[in-house]
Image (spheres, rainbow, N blue to C red):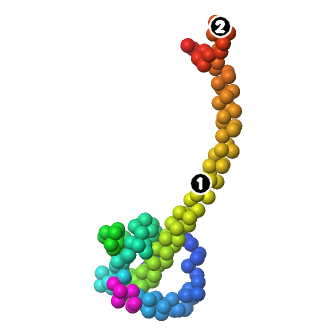
């Protein structure tokens, strides 16, 4: 079972990264998910080959949950449900039920939490830098505007026709 969910980011490596033949990540995931299952945040159902999440929307807003869930839909069946004010429920199920062991479901849960954190950071940074981004876009558009304004002025001059009194009018040549 591939828990990378089509994620091509290379930032999954870190102090707990499991290298070839290693199992450091497995041991840490087991401890973390044992605690999470006690808090009812994560439930791994080995019989149904799925992972159930009960997420706090104050920690993981609905937009963040949807974004993280979207990254998994190519490889897994994902259902997002619940009340965005109290608890958001997410169920992630292997599309091929016969190839998901308990440890692979644990890794799937860990991968989903990494995606939640990643999506949350992306959203926070987008909000933080929105004013800067909008100012840069505005400046770029304004720098393009003088050439557009000059072209419009030249177009206006070419369409003005003098009337019988010698004053120019804004009428086109067909009127």
Question: Measuring 65% from the left and 44% from the top, which residue is drawn there?
Answer: 142
* Residue beneath disc 1: 134
| Front-lying residue, 106 or 126 | 126
Where 151 falls versus 101 (above or below)?
Answer: above
Could you say whether the residue bearing mark 2 is in a helix, strand or loop? loop
Question: Measuring 65% from the left and 7% from the top, which residue is drawn there?
Answer: 165
Q: CA distance from mark 2 to mark 1?
A: 49 Å
Q: Quadrant of the C terminus?
A: top right
Among the 4 quarters of the image, the one containing residue 160:
top right
Q: Is residue 74 visible?
A: no
Indicate yes or no whether the magenta region holds residue 62: no
Task: Please tell me which of labels 2 and 1 falls first in the chain.
Answer: 1
The reply to whether callout 2 and callout 1 are in contact (CB within 8 Å) is: no
**Left-right relation of 141 to 81:** right
Please count the marks in the image.
2
Please state the horizontal and vertical placement of residue 51, each as a whole percent of the image: 36, 80
Label 2 vs label 1, nearer the camera: 2
In the image, the segment drawn in magenta is 34-40
Where 169 falls versus 148 (above or below)?
Answer: above
On residue 112, which mark appears?
A: none
Question: Measuring 60% from the left and 19% from the top, which residue is drawn there?
Answer: 170
* Residue beneath disc 2: 165
Please state the horizontal and vertical placement of residue 54, each as a whole percent of the image: 35, 77
Q: Quadrant of the N terminus?
A: bottom left
Among the 4 quarters of the image, the one containing residue 68:
bottom left
Where 63 falls versus 135 (above or below)?
Answer: below
Dominant secondary structure, magenta: helix
């Amino acid at each position: 079972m591939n828990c990378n969910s089509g994620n091509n980011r290379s930032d999954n490596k870190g102090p707990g990264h499991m290298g070839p033949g290693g199992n450091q990540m497995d041991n840490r995931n087991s401890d973390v998910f044992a605690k999470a299952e006690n808090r009812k945040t994560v439930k791994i159902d080995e019989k149904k080959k799925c992972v159930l999440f009960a997420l706090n929307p104050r920690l993981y807003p609905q937009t963040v949950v949807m974004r993280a869930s979207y990254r998994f839909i190519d490889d897994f069946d994902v259902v997002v449900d619940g009340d965005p004010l109290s608890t958001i429920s997410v169920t992630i199920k292997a599309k091929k039920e016969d190839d998901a062991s308990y440890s692979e479901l644990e890794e799937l849960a860990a991968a989903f939490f990494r995606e939640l954190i990643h999506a949350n950071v992306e959203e926070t940074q987008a909000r933080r830098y929105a004013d800067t981004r909008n100012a840069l876009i505005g400046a770029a558009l304004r720098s393009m505007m003088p050439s557009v304004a000059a072209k419009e002025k030249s177009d206006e001059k070419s369409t003005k026709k003098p009337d019988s009194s010698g004053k120019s009018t804004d009428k086109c040549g067909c009127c």
